[in-house]
Image (tube, rainbow, N blue to C red):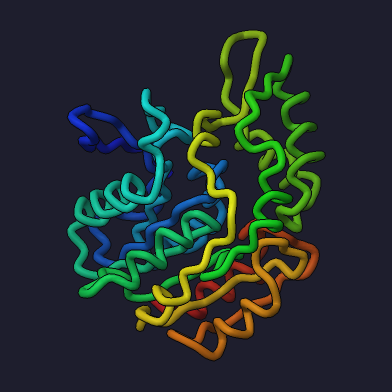
Amino acid sequence: MQQHYLQYHWYGQHYTVGYRAHGEASNPKVLVCVHGVSRNARDFDIVGEALSDFYYVIALDMPGRGQSEWLDDKSHYGNALYDTVAGEIIAMTGAVKVDWLGTSMGGHIGMRLAAMPGSPIRKLVLNDIGPFVPAAGRRANGANFGEDNRFASEAEGIQWVRENRTAFGPFTDAEWEQFGRDSLRRISDEEWGLDYDPGLAQTKTEGDTDTWEQWAQISCPVLEVWGLDSKLLTADTIQQMKTTGPKAEVYEVAGAGHCPGLTDDRQIGVIREFLNP
């Protein structure tokens, strides 16, 4: 894995986003991975490394997360910004077509790009997200999103993550330890925090999300990785995804909610088989 950075322009300012790259940059086969709203590129370290024998894998930190800069004006976080950054990353690779793996918010970005005329997306993998998200599920999932949690030690932060992010997984104890560590940023010698800008919560959506019209415009193959305990992706939505638009393939993950961790061999194997790079 190599850490890289890319500059982009937004409202007359220069900003930097970070991305983690696996494999050879000369590989014309590119897989772009984008995380959920409060997560970061490190969520794809295992799956990215596993697929780097076939792909140049780029795992992106969207603005306000991980190694990417935080915006001064929090109202500028949102779809327009994320789609712009995604376009910059794809253009940087020089690839005519890319494959896309998106968890939650990253899946929504992928769906928007896939629905556009002349889309650069060849195949789309969605990790526990679909064209409809119920408001009640979103509230349950984002109950403490935006809180500026501080911890006196890394161990304390890891324990908080394990207690408050139980819908992820399923993880072994060692994977929980790594997931917790990957969720944190070091603020000082004596203080740790979650690795995202709490100001992101200023632009969060409160109601239902309904993008079925957009779903109907997607023509590329789609694989849905569904956490069976998910509160954001319901059985009714899954059924409609199977029978409309691109008619998604669905892989069910027991013991996970929102979202499957993409760390075990079976999940990675299903994704590899679908992408068939």
User: In the figure, is residue 2 to the left or right of 232?
Assistant: left
Q: Give the residue displayed 81% in from the left and 39% down from the top.
A: 163
Q: Residue furthest bottom?
A: 243
User: Which image quadrant is residue 118 in?
Assistant: bottom left
- Classify the position of the C terminus by image quarter: bottom left
| Residue 177, position as x, y percentages in the image | 73, 39
Q: Nearer the viewer, residue 208 or 84?
A: 208
Height in image: 155 above or below 267? above
Height in image: 5 above or below 41? above
Q: Give the residue displayed 44% in from the left and 33% down from the top.
A: 64
- Classify the position of the N terminus by image quarter: top left
Q: Residue furthest front?
A: 207
Q: Residue furthest top?
A: 189
User: In the figure, is residue 261 to the left or right of 223?
Assistant: right
| Residue 104, position as x, y percentages in the image | 55, 57
| Residue 253, position as x, y percentages in the image | 71, 70
